[in-house]
Image (cartoon, grey):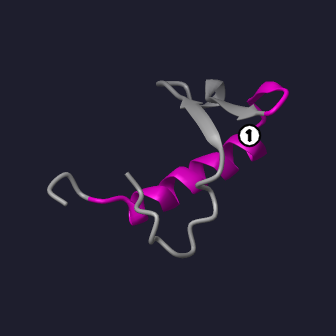
Amino acid sequence: MVPFTAEGFGGAGNSLLYAYGPVPRLDTVQVDVLHGPILLDADSQVARYRALLDKALTFALSAGR
């Protein structure tokens, strides 16, 4: 959970699903937009969303907070 007070986290406005497994080349991102879901699987696209999720972890609350 990322608190609303987290400044500098620009990825909070989109709903997304990051599907990954033991073979990183098969990672896929599903982004939900107004006209329906978009599936992304290009390495450069997936890398951007992986970086966004890594950044979210730095802003996320711990289980005890």
Q: Describe residue 33's horizontal placement relative to residue 15 as left or right.
A: right
Q: Secondary structure at mark 1?
A: helix
Which residue is label 1 attached to?
43
Q: Describe residue 16's horizontal placement relative to residue 5 as left or right.
A: right
**Does 18 sit above or below residue 59?**
above
- The residue located at (80%, 33%) in the rendering is 34
- The residue located at (54%, 25%) in the rendering is 23
Residue situated in front as seen by the camera: 56 or 23: 56
Q: Position of residue 60 (x, y in %)?
A: 37, 59
Region of the chain picked out in magenta, as a range: 34-61
Q: Position of residue 52 (x, y in %)?
A: 59, 55
> Which quadrant, please, contains the C terminus?
bottom left
Q: Position of residue 19 (x, y in %)?
A: 55, 27
Q: Position of residue 47 (x, y in %)?
A: 66, 48
Q: Which image quadrant for residue 57? A: bottom left
The magenta stretch spans residue 23: no
Q: Which image quadrant for residue 61? A: bottom left
Amino acid beneath label 1: Asp
Q: Describe residue 33's horizontal placement relative to residue 26 as left or right.
A: right
- The residue located at (58%, 31%) in the rendering is 17
The magenta stretch spans residue 41: yes
